[in-house]
Image (cartoon, rainbow, N blue to C red):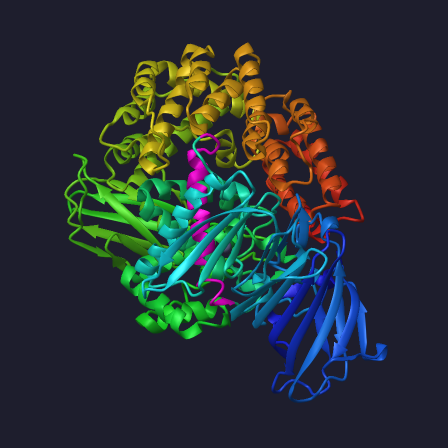
Amino acid sequence: MSADKTVYLKDYRPTDFIIETVDLIFELGAEMTTVGSEIRLSRRPGSPADAPLTLDGDSLELAGLALDGKPLAPERYEAAADGLTVHGLPESGSFTLTVKTRINPSANTQLLGLYRTSGLFSTQCEAEGFRRITYFYDRPDVLAVYTVTIIADKESCPLLLSNGNLIEERNLEDGRHMAKWHDPFPKPSYLFALVAGDLAMIEDQFTTMSGRAVTLRIYVEHGKADRADYAMDSLKRAMRWDEERFGREYDLDIFMIVAVSDFNMGAMENKGLNIFNDRLILADPETATDDDYLRIEAVVAHEYFHNWTGNRITCRDWFQLSLKEGLTVYREHEFTADQRTRPVVRVDEVKFLRANQFPEDGGPLAHPVRPTQYLEIDNFYTTTVYEKGSEVSRMIATLLGTDNFRRGLDLFFERHDGGAVTIEDYLKCFEDATGRDLSHFALWYHQAGTPVISVQSAYDEAASTLSLTLQQKTPPTPGQKEKKPLHIPLRVGLIGPNGDGMEPSAVSGGERTEDVLHLTEAEQTFVFKGIGARPAISVNRDFSAPVKVNFEQSRDDRMAIARFETDLVARWDAINGLALQALVEATAAVRAGTPISVDPALAEALIETAGDETLEPAFRALALTLPSELDIGRELGRDIDPDAIHAARRTVFGSLAREGAERFRQLVDALSGDTEFSPNADSAGRRALRNTALAYLASATDEPGAARAAYDAATNMTDMIAALRILAHQFPDAEETAAVLDDFRHRFAGEPLVLDKWFGAQATIPGEEALERVKRLMQDEAFDALNPNRVRALVGAFASSNPTGFNRPDGAGYRFFADFILDADKRNPTLTARLMTVMRSFEALEVGRQAKARTELERIAGHETLSRNLRDIIDRMLK
Ligand code: ZN
């Protein structure tokens, strides 16, 4: 709340003391757990001889404090819930501080620190959760070797897990038992983990490239063990891939994953003991969609990859968060691309970035990939730090080439293994390994905002030259008014009149490597020589830079790119761009009260692409998927009227559907009836195309029969939920829809994760009645306002993905959401602050809704007792 809590990068300094080892003893009790912590410390050479030891704490109760075994006199220390200060410690040599705290895991609804839900004890320590367990230097640059003893009732907690290797296990009196774990790798406190309870387990083995056997275990709720196979398979593929692609081998004898049902985020890379949101582990064909499988594969790999990028080499401070997250997302993206089809995977990444990171970067919460200040670090686990950070590493790879990138990364591992380092340290490795100066490029880490590149072209027939003038401009963002030009690697392709690619004989005006133009100035003109005919110009192929491109191209040029570009990402982008333009025009027509006309050439191109057998089904599905209502709103950027957008999109969708009805029916028929389910990319792509076609077909026939039949015939969750969504969204009032929703509810009565899909499908049914529907669903006994997955599936989906329902003109959607946030903030601030961000672009709404939204945001801001997380977000949103 007060500005003095702000943390600044410039204030970084190392701790006065060094922690060598930590011995923890947990005596687990549901309402009362005692934590004994024995820390071996010494004064850091050069730090003042009289400096006190100041440890972090959060909501702690001190139950004992001793120095080298002797209780400390009260005048030697000050203990508060949020910190412990000890005076008069030895000037030299090591000493041992023994700290005892008491905590209540059952009362911990924040899900940060040690918490107990559904009978399971588990921890979440990143970023600052360890201080809710014991007093400690809870910061990433303090690396220590941990030994952990866990004592608990054996019957309710047969399983006792922590990081590293199990070194002792034995029964105790009174039905209790103990287990002792030792992690030989020094680690920061945020990577500490403990799990205790009663779980099922699957086990496998992995032999590393140097021939060491590693035991792999995945723990899940009883009765769900057969749903962990895909996660295990993904893990083994990730381990092999990291060896082959980056030479990274696993380092402990055991690697464990635990799936928990109450978790704020996706998953957590604790050393040797990853903890996952169970929705990112559990999958079988009957309960998980293709998208779930994809996410499981990606996140299992992501957390595994952290073992080297994050754990072996960690962050000096939280400003460096992207050092581990951006790089690890990049590694994850490369893995997924290698496991599936590269351009299809890339299109998904582009869509995600545009839908999530661009709005963040263009709104009140914009911040650099490497921020310089924060009030609450929890709020910086953002798409900018993660996905834009990944794009920055991708651009380094583009600038240097694959081999040089690998060389730089090898040096990084060699030089910094065991260290807590900065983004500068990371960049220096690429410079030292390749001799390339990255000082200009580094600005990507420090300057927020999405650069806009304006393109102008001129073709000179007589001289056979094409000049391409590129201008870059990055809009102002909070705290950064003036922007400098960046070093932007931009892939550009030329498509000749017959659809073939054109190669210039020479290019002047700036550095060029292969098809990459290096834009380094505010404005630069590249001249391509030896261009015999006027080409269509494809800019930002493969989305080589995370930028917006402003290029007024003729429809013919865009069609040429849509048809002939060999880079499928650019090809998709051209198709998508044409569709988006049509939808924007249709929205304008709705608002002006004029009729909507859909360009027949666009319809033809889409329908043709849908049937193009030379393209893989997944790509065709992407091409056929119209930009969403949210995409259209973002494209408009201001004065957004969600009802007009909805009406426009519905009309365009319907007209495409009728136009292509024949083709859609063929596709549905041809692609139905795969009996053997395989989660592989190819099968998933066929299902995606079939279900996209089914949605069009339902609209073309304007009756629910086909979708109802598809629901009944479905043999997997992907097809089932697709049919259900078509019914719910296109025919909300049909009898068929009611019947299917009811069937689904009963069929999956004991399956919270599956019911999340049911909540989500209904939360996003467009229209005014959505709010009442959501309120009704909150009364369903499967809803649980304390569980983050349930909240996101229902309230989150409503607020983020139901533009007409949430943005009701009377403001009732905002009021409901604000009430929910205010209530939930008392229990789980991480969750509420995150939820709140869905309203960050409220100023882009038309004035009436904007005013109503502002009223509710101001009402929230007016509460005195907000969590720091929510206070930080709301204040920045209203600035
Ligand atoms: Zn991560």
Q: Is residue 238 above or below residue 422?
A: above
Q: Is residue 193 above or below residue 451?
A: below
Q: Position of residue 306 (x, y in %)?
A: 46, 59
| 554 vs 224, nearest the viewer | 224
Q: Which residues are magenta?
A: 286-314
Viewer can see residue 486: no
Viewer can see residue 243: yes
Q: Position of residue 843 (x, y in %)?
A: 62, 39
In percent of the image, x 81 and y 73: which residue is there?
78
Quarter of the figure with residue 124? bottom right
| 577 vs 839, nearest the viewer | 839
| 218 vs 520, nearest the viewer | 218
> Which quadrant is the N terminus positioned in?
bottom right
In percent of the image, x 75 and y 54: which residue is there?
104
Quarter of the figure with residue 435? bottom left
In percent of the image, x 43 and y 20: which residue is there?
652
Q: Position of residue 585 (x, y in %)?
A: 45, 25
Q: Along the horizontal axis of the image, is 651 left or right of 496?
A: right
